[in-house]
Amino acid sequence: MTKTEQPRRQSRPAFLGDLFESLTERGRRLLGWRETEGRDAIEAPDLSELAERLLSRRGEASGVVLARGLLTAFDHADPPARLAFLQTLADRFGPDPELVGPAVAAVQKNPGAVEAVEALHAASEPRRQELLRRLNLAPGGTAALVRMREELLRHLRDQPDLRRLDSDFAHLFASWFNRGFLVLRHIDWNTPASILEKIIRYEAVHAIRNWDDLRNRLQPTDRRCYGFFHPQLVDEPLIFVEVALTTSIPDNVGGLLDLSRQPIRAGDANTAVFYSISNTQRGLAGVSFGNFLIKQVVEELKAELPDIRSFVTLSPVPGFAAWLARTRADETSDLLDADQRIALAALDEPEWHKTPAKAKALRDPLLAAAAAYFLRARDKAGRVPDPVARFHLGNGARLERLNHLGDISANGLKQSHGLMVNYLYDLDRIEVNHEGFAERSHVAASDSVTAALTATRS
Amino acid sequence: MTKTEQPRRQSRPAFLGDLFESLTERGRRLLGWRETEGRDAIEAPDLSELAERLLSRRGEASGVVLARGLLTAFDHADPPARLAFLQTLADRFGPDPELVGPAVAAVQKNPGAVEAVEALHAASEPRRQELLRRLNLAPGGTAALVRMREELLRHLRDQPDLRRLDSDFAHLFASWFNRGFLVLRHIDWNTPASILEKIIRYEAVHAIRNWDDLRNRLQPTDRRCYGFFHPQLVDEPLIFVEVALTTSIPDNVGGLLDLSRQPIRAGDANTAVFYSISNTQRGLAGVSFGNFLIKQVVEELKAELPDIRSFVTLSPVPGFAAWLARTRADETSDLLDADQRIALAALDEPEWHKTPAKAKALRDPLLAAAAAYFLRARDKAGRVPDPVARFHLGNGARLERLNHLGDISANGLKQSHGLMVNYLYDLDRIEVNHEGFAERSHVAASDSVTAALTATRS
Amino acid sequence: MTKTEQPRRQSRPAFLGDLFESLTERGRRLLGWRETEGRDAIEAPDLSELAERLLSRRGEASGVVLARGLLTAFDHADPPARLAFLQTLADRFGPDPELVGPAVAAVQKNPGAVEAVEALHAASEPRRQELLRRLNLAPGGTAALVRMREELLRHLRDQPDLRRLDSDFAHLFASWFNRGFLVLRHIDWNTPASILEKIIRYEAVHAIRNWDDLRNRLQPTDRRCYGFFHPQLVDEPLIFVEVALTTSIPDNVGGLLDLSRQPIRAGDANTAVFYSISNTQRGLAGVSFGNFLIKQVVEELKAELPDIRSFVTLSPVPGFAAWLARTRADETSDLLDADQRIALAALDEPEWHKTPAKAKALRDPLLAAAAAYFLRARDKAGRVPDPVARFHLGNGARLERLNHLGDISANGLKQSHGLMVNYLYDLDRIEVNHEGFAERSHVAASDSVTAALTATRS
Amino acid sequence: MTKTEQPRRQSRPAFLGDLFESLTERGRRLLGWRETEGRDAIEAPDLSELAERLLSRRGEASGVVLARGLLTAFDHADPPARLAFLQTLADRFGPDPELVGPAVAAVQKNPGAVEAVEALHAASEPRRQELLRRLNLAPGGTAALVRMREELLRHLRDQPDLRRLDSDFAHLFASWFNRGFLVLRHIDWNTPASILEKIIRYEAVHAIRNWDDLRNRLQPTDRRCYGFFHPQLVDEPLIFVEVALTTSIPDNVGGLLDLSRQPIRAGDANTAVFYSISNTQRGLAGVSFGNFLIKQVVEELKAELPDIRSFVTLSPVPGFAAWLARTRADETSDLLDADQRIALAALDEPEWHKTPAKAKALRDPLLAAAAAYFLRARDKAGRVPDPVARFHLGNGARLERLNHLGDISANGLKQSHGLMVNYLYDLDRIEVNHEGFAERSHVAASDSVTAALTATRS
């Protein structure tokens, strides 16, 4: 690999002074910096002006220098200046009114003309989109834009006007981070530490406590980890999934993460368990990777280990406890009957899960409630209320099993009274499941789940 | 590198039968194939129907399989079926009228509302764009789409309606092949043969006769070759430039390509000569790479060889002879004066360049005409008539020198009476030059070129 | 990969002047060069003196500089100086007599003492061995030493005293090029051109005419090529084998090399044919690679293509025609009987192979003679006379089939009257075969070969 | 990189059962295993018998299988069986008496004949050497042999006869791990975790407490780490050195390792400090890497950072406190005079280093004693007593500075009363220094060190 092929990394924004020094006299002039100012007296150039210049004719000749300058200056601007710049992009870099007016008129004049509509589409493109494309010319530009959007997202609630800018980011990122451009990589103990520390940092489901915990998830013969990477973000997994190879569908997470567990040989496994899947880049919110990742990992594992027959998750149920509290409080709801309500009162006793008799007595009522939560409950928008369920069911998975006391960590008890569930990925069924779910909100579920619905009602 | 990181290659379209065999029962069902048909009886599924399915909700769950199936089926369809599919895309996958109508109405109702305009932009996006994005999900999808557009371009003249589809390709390719996603690579004698054979095939300026000729352009210490590659087209340079390192600005191409030439040490060179630059992918027409390539190679060479001071081209002048013939025939043109016209009559004598006296006598008149061609002549659109000149001047280069008898090959004599020119890339001047050229059609030229304009007129 | 990991290449010896310039004042002093001499006045330093210095105590501190200097100086010395240096190594860098004498005495005094014998072994090591080990410290040292031995081998016949030096090379190379240090690589059309041109150059069995011919042996789905590489000789295959995947054991080479042949799918093959195996480094003569290469390629192919059942060669019989001429001339030989001698007279007719009737009539007598050549004839040293046969039989292969008119090229007719043979590698039989051959000169042969022996005698 | 190029790893010995399963019937037969025994009933085959077989004629055909079997069986044998095997190698695989006797006789008969001496050398080679070479044929063989010698070294003290075997290991390893076969690699935060954990484990000078401490030595702009790797031990650095880039020669290690330190830019440094150098493979004891490593890293840093002028170590003085205790106890020694002895008595006060006045008062006497330790003291073998000093002075470095209280860790106080020293590597002086040290035990020292010798004596 020659020097010029090296992937471009910009793990942290370069110093403004470094940028200044690296520029020729020409570059400084372009960015509006005077030679005499010296390193210490550098003021960030005006961001909006740089943006206009980058979009201008002159920007064609000097795109890379201007883009790099603008992104570095943005990184070094103070927070108010950065926010002001984002607002400027939202306000002043929309569609060009001088182009839109005539294009609309043309459509009005001849409503059926496809050409006119397509011309209108082009004319109404916000100028921001071309600006973002040109910013992407800079070395490390893609990463810088992902960071920029991450910042933007933090302001969205307070500044709803920024939503316009956000939708342009979303549109371009969907194109740039198209599945076709992603690379699946096996992450293991031979992976560079600079990537592994991000796995530790980004793990969102079951926190990785330290490097030993990490190694325990990567190195044993019955563990796998895969991530999607983008050629422009070489050290950054966009999403990753942790997999355990087992001989049965697990019903709790404690055994999977046990550091003293004895690994089995990969070839002896018949089940692959996706027990954690984490997105890493908040700046890529809304660009969907998880669906593709799970399916491609299923294909990889099938090819490598033909004896694996079941591909399941071991998943949290983050909305269950809150839903159950609301439903118990709502005496008009028919999702729980009177017997259930009485039985579930035991949930209010502290530490109930530590008393085997209490835990056992709660089992059937809780699973029945859980079945109702998945199969019958709907939120105000008519959706299945659990976000993790929506993700897997939307991918075409089936709700396979409800696991009482699958996660007895403090968090597990709090969010779901300890409930965990398995979703099953059967590639031969995913379209049917997906379609049923997408079009009719039909939840694909195993017999055991369906049976649980009525278990206590007989 | 684990197996899953391997770049995806699809050097040739897979056999339809291979695809069939590689599919599970589910995949065949998805693509509308019946199991019983067997390998030999496979009929390509209906392309338009597959496209509709890929855009439908169901396509979300099975995107990769559907995209791969559609692209493979397209590759194996016969030419009329392929053309019909392209026409269908142009005709039936435009903006959705049910979305456009209300969006236009909303803008009309409230002409100043930016939100409405931006909503209209979204509503008027041709459905083709999303379809092309989804086709890109397939392994090798990007390459297949580039090939598809190459085919499309061949039909454009006869089928102007296809232009609508073409502009969607152009829009998406500009985004996907953004400079930020390209990788510059040094191409040398250690480069895989599978890439080198493409250099031989694609060289557009000075044909490479065989592998020895190729080695002579790659291996000597005073030769370089660089190309841009895209992560999705691993074996395909998108554009490449051949460079000679010299101790002076060369005035003819014969010496550069001489197989028996004695190489100099790279460190002894003071001049880098870009003597050939070739685009390779007709399917990427309109996506501009050359400007960025030349500038990045200048940066690379500056870093590696600080003694190099001049970065010049040695370029053909493809439009000169035709322009000169037209201008000589047009007696009203003031671009040539009477003395010139008389002197230039010697051009009509066959083999004039082989007689030193004749060649010498033609030198000044020819160079004066060439200077007029570059500095004064304009085509009907008001542009500098030479396409190569437009490229380099548009990049901000300066016309540095006119070389009499720089290329005495049959083709060189035919297209430009043997004239070659040097363009100079001075990074400190390119914006000024670019701006002058873009906004005022001003041709940046050295004193020697300007002087040539009037050389024979005194 | 960081810069420092780049494999060290020295495709051609550096210029002596380059070496001079690259040295610090200290390096020049070490090599006995004066600063004032300048690039053009460099005289090679005295090689023997450098060698003594490298072996001295001082050499420990400056080993790399001295080793590099000596090897570069050797490369630039004129042939007589190089030969003189080799002779000096043979004459003056043998075992140190001051060490050997006492060590021999110690053994004599106590003949049974193992320690004394082992001390004697150490004391009697030629000083050359340590010198060669230290020369190997230089960047590119291994390659330079292989070249040095290649030169040495050319002088061996005329200068038998050099044999002492040669045996030290052989001893060290056997250790350095131990199978454990070799890397098997698939050579295909994605291999760098710098390696592929060596395949063209080194192919020893069926010459590769040009790059198209090469591609025809690498790129089709039913062709493979593998080579052994050494970490210190990154661009140089040490040995390579060309393989054809077929559906039957081929009986002639023309069909295999046919450029217009229609490839089959690799998965459809049941036979792998090793049709060419070439050593590349004359400097490594006597270090055996072929045996390991064939067996490892068999393992590779078995793992990749489990349907392949037969692993055979298609081999020349280089000694057959000469042997047959001698045997026919020797009327006392019982390896041919009278009928055979008469029938074989037809071989003396020019172009006999072009007349089908003649060719057919010669078939049985020729094959019978061939069977005698392999199974009964022995050379003066009691060995099977054919060198290719000795190689494969020594590896444990079995002589499987005799192919009349398998190679009708001029060379094939001249060396073996067109005969080619197949050797079969059956891993389950190779030890038995090897042992029979090594200990009892027993030639493992198929029934068809054994039958041919007596075919015409009935 | 094709599949077959993957470096061969054998991070831990394969299960004996895995080996059994991976063998064909033929392989099992070779290793003396019966098919019927099954995985659980596998007995290790007799190691000595396998060794004889590997050395036999038959071993030529099946070398890889036999070598792999023997090494795996050795790894799974119990400790007594392993020791017994090592003893067998030492006892029964020495030189072949049947070859040695006649060879000695030939030398006796003709004492001056070089050929006879060289033949004797060959005849007296212990059979072990060829056995070890053949064991190296196995995948992972080199690593297994390094582990085998590590075990051997642990028995050497108790079993001095094993020394014979050890010297064969040493001889072969010196050849196989020749500097010419080592690869220098930059180790940084992008290095695989599997290698980095070895850095943590093997660091021998200043223990690395955890991954944060490690990152602090690798990732900052002013830190470097380099190691030598061997192509056959891909994940194992053989030796590594940690480097700090600074603006002055440091006099204590605390500042270098401070986690809260502010890094400087590499380009601003003028000094490179080798503050830790660790060998990793006990099995390679006696094969010297450190000298080459330091010198090559100096070359690397010079090329990358031309502003670095000084290359120094910051080194412990492990033998100082013990020597000083002995010398103070020996009243006859003239290495300390009476005044020094009185002043040094303060060393016996606990925690003296925490009282500034005491620490200051001890400074000059301690440094004077240290100067005597380096410059005047000699051990029984006449050597400089400090092992670290012998290493650096033997490499040609100069003792540059004595640093009072350079290491006030418990260990630093205990072994050297807190003393640390700097050795300076000046490539232009190393031969002279090396030679003076090697031949005359002359210690190259700066004026300040020499001055310290007499500082308190005036």
Image (tube, coloured by chain):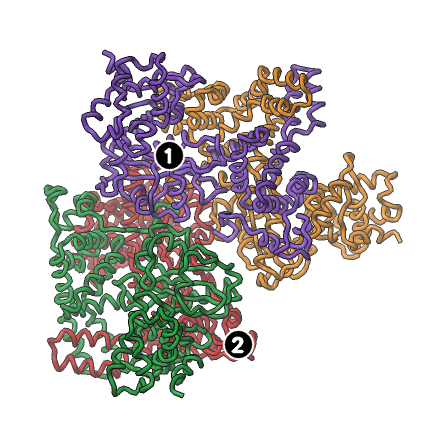
Chain colours: A red, B green, C purple, D orange
For the residue pair B445 and D354, the one nearer the viewer reads as B445
Q: Of the residues shown, which amino acid type is indicated by label 2?
A: Ile
Q: Which residue is mark 2?
A: A42
Residue drawn at (71%, 23%), measured in percent from left and top? C101
Quadrant in the picture for residue C137: top right
Is D420 or C452 nearer to us in this picture?
C452
Image: C306 above or below D292:
above
Question: Which chain hosts label 1?
Answer: C
Q: Position of residue A162 (x, y in %)?
A: 33, 74
Residue tagged 1: C277
- Drawn side of residue C71 relative to residue B432, left or right: right
In this rendering, is residue C388 above or below A43? Answer: above
Question: Which residue type does callout 1 highlight?
Answer: Ile
Dot 1, crowdedness within 10 Å: few (<14), some or many (≥20)?
A: many
Residue A129 visible in rendering:
no
Residue D84 shows up from this direction: yes
Q: Quadrant of the N terminus of chain D?
A: top left
